[in-house]
Image (cartoon, rainbow, N blue to C red):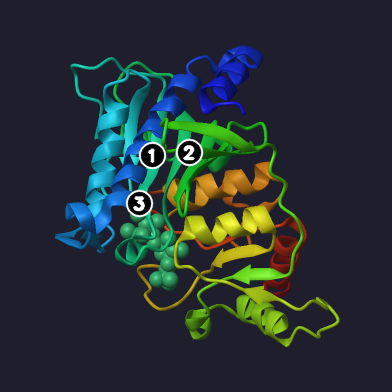
C-alpha cells in the first residue's frame, strides 16, 4: 500500500507547478495524527468537557476544540510552508510568527468538527481548505475571502473507529487510513466517485424554519411514492458535518444544512470558508455537486471570514433535483 507521502511525492513529480504542496499537506496530516491520538485518550487524560470559554461563533468551546486548534497552529506555523491561518475558533487570522519563514499557502480550518459528539465517543473530525498566496507581505483577513473554486487542496480527517484522511488536490478524491502502530497514513481508496443512492442527511427537527423548496424536497423523500422521485429514502444524522457528508460521499445521497429563519443574524449554520467550501470541493471532485439551492458554493465570493451559507452537497442527480425545486420557487 502507498503511504500519503508516496502519493504526495508522485503528485508533485507529475504536477511540478505544485511544488511545495506535499510538505504543506504533510503538516496537516501530522496535526491530524496528533489530534487523533488525543481524541483516542479523551477522558483518560482529562480533556473532555467544556473549557468555559466562548468562541467568535458564540459557541461554548470544548477543551478539545481549543487543543485541536492549538495543534493545528503549532504544526503549521513553524514549517515555513504557510503564509497565514484562519480557524473557526479565532476571530481573526493567525499571523506566522516573525521567527519562522513564510510559505506560499493559506489554510482555513475547522480544527474539531462535531464538538457536541466529543464526550460521547461519536464521530468528530478536522476540515481544511488550502488557498495559494503569492505575495511576500503578511496576509490580512481579506486575503482569505476567495471563492472556493480557487482552492488548490481540501480535505478532512474523520476520527471514527479508525482515523481517515480524505483529500483532494484537484485531481479526484483519495482516502487514506491511519495506521496508529507506525504513525503513517496509507492510501485505502483511490478516486472516490459519489454513487447515486436514495439517502438524505438533515436535521429534520428544523423543518418548520426552512424555506418552501427544502420542505417540498423532504416531503417527497418521506412520501417515497411520488412520481418524481419514486425511491424509498433512508435518513441518517450524526450531528457532525464531516461524518454525515462522508457517508454521502462514499455511499451516495445528499447532506444538507439548509437556510433557516430561526435567527435573522444567522441565515444558515455552517461556515463557508472552513466547512462548506472545502467539503464542496471534495464533492465536486468526486463527481457530485454543491449548492446553496440557488448558487454554486464554489462560485460564492466570501464577504467575511466566518460567513455562514446554506449547504446542499451530494450526488449530481439529487442536487440537480433540489436545485430545480428552488428555481421553481423563484
Ligand atoms: P462545530 O462542532 O465545528 O461547531 O460544527 C458543528 C456543526 C456540524 O458539524 C454539524 O453538521 C452541525 O453543527 C450539527 O448541528 P445540529 O446541532 O443542528 O445537529
Ligand atoms: Mn464550533
Ligand atoms: Mn464544524
Ligand atoms: Mn469546530
Residue depicted at 32% across the width and 43% down the height: 37
Give how far across and how far down residue 229 sits, in percent. 80, 76
Does residue 309 appear anywhere in the picture?
A: yes
Q: Nearer the viewer, residue 171 or 258?
A: 171
The mark nearer the N terminus, 3 or 2, is: 3
Residue depth check, mark 1 versus mark 3: number of the one nearer the observer: 1
Give how far across and how far down residue 82 sits, in percent. 36, 24
The reply to whether discs 1 and 2 touch (Cβ–Cβ < 8 Å) is: yes
Give how far across and how far down residue 305 sits, in percent. 36, 47
Image quarter for residue 261?
bottom left
The mark nearer the N terminus, 1 or 3, is: 1
Compute the Cα span from label 1 to label 2. Answer: 10 Å
| Secondary structure state at the residue bearing disc 2 | strand
Quadrant for the N terminus, please.
top right
Residue depicted at 29% across the width and 24% down the height: 138
Image quarter for residue 282?
top right
In the picture of the structure, the residue carrying the numbered disc 2 is: 178
In the picture of the structure, the residue carrying the numbered disc 3 is: 112
In the picture of the structure, the residue carrying the numbered disc 1 is: 32
Q: Nearer the viewer, residue 201 or 83?
A: 201
Asked if the residue at label 3 sits under 8 Å from ligand 4, the reply is yes
Crowding at mark 1 (Cα within 10 Å: few <14, some 14-19, many 20+): many
Crowding at mark 2 (Cα within 10 Å: few <14, some 14-19, many 20+): many
The mark nearer the N terminus, 1 or 2, is: 1
Farthest residue in the front direction? 181
Compute the Cα span from label 1 to label 3. Answer: 10 Å
| Secondary structure state at the residue bearing disc 3 | strand
The reply to whether discs 1 and 3 touch (Cβ–Cβ < 8 Å) is: no
| Secondary structure state at the residue bearing disc 1 | helix
Residue depicted at 41% across the width and 31% down the height: 183
- Which quarter of the frame holds ligand 4? bottom left
Residue depth check, mark 3 versus mark 2: number of the one nearer the observer: 2
Amino acid at each position: 500500500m502507498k503511504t500519503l507521502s508516496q502519493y504526495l511525492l508522485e503528485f508533485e513529480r507529475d504536477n511540478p507547478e505544485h511544488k511545495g504542496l506535499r510538505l504543506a499537506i504533510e503538516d496537516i496530516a501530522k496535526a491530524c495524527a496528533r489530534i487523533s491520538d488525543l481524541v483516542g485518550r479523551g477522558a483518560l487524560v482529562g480533556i473532555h468537557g467544556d473549557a468555559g470559554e466562548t468562541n467568535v461563533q458564540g459557541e461554548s468551546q470544548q477543551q478539545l476544540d481549543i487543543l485541536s486548534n492549538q495543534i493545528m497552529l503549532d504544526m503549521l506555523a513553524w514549517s515555513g510552508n504557510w503564509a497565514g491561518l484562519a480557524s473557526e475558533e479565532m476571530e481573526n487570522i493567525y499571523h506566522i510568527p516573525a521567527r519562522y519563514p513564510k510559505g506560499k499557502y493559506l489554510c482555513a480550518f475547522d480544527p474539531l468538527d462535531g464538538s457536541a459528539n466529543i464526550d460521547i465517543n461519536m464521530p468528530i473530525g478536522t476540515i481544511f481548505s488550502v488557498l495559494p498566496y503569492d505575495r511576500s507581505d503578511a496576509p490580512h483577513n481579506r486575503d482569505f475571502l476567495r471563492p472556493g473554486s480557487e482552492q488548490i487542496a481540501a480535505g478532512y480527517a474523520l476520527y471514527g473507529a479508525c482515523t481517515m484522511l480524505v483529500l483532494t488536490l484537484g485531481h479526484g478524491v483519495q482516502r487514506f487510513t491511519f495506521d496508529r502502530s507506525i504513525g503513517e497514513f496509507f492510501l485505502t481508496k483511490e478516486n472516490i466517485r459519489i454513487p447515486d443512492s436514495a439517502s438524505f442527511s438533515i436535521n429534520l427537527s428544523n423543518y418548520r424554519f426552512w424555506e418552501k423548496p427544502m420542505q417540498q424536497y423532504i416531503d417527497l423523500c418521506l412520501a417515497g411514492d411520488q412520481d418524481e422521485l419514486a425511491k424509498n429514502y433512508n435518513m441518517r444524522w450524526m450531528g457532525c458535518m464531516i461524518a454525515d457528508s462522508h457517508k454521502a460521499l462514499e455511499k451516495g445521497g445528499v447532506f444538507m444544512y439548509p437556510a433557516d429563519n430561526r435567527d435573522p443574524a444567522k441565515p444558515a449554520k455552517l461556515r463557508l470558508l472552513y466547512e462548506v467550501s472545502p467539503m464542496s470541493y471534495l464533492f465536486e471532485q468526486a463527481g457530485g455537486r454543491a449548492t446553496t439551492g440557488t448558487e454554486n458554493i464554489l462560485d460564492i465570493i466570501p464577504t467575511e471570514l466566518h460567513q455562514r451559507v446554506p449547504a446542499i452537497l451530494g450526488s449530481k442527480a439529487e442536487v440537480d433535483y433540489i436545485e430545480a425545486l428552488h428555481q421553481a420557487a423563484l
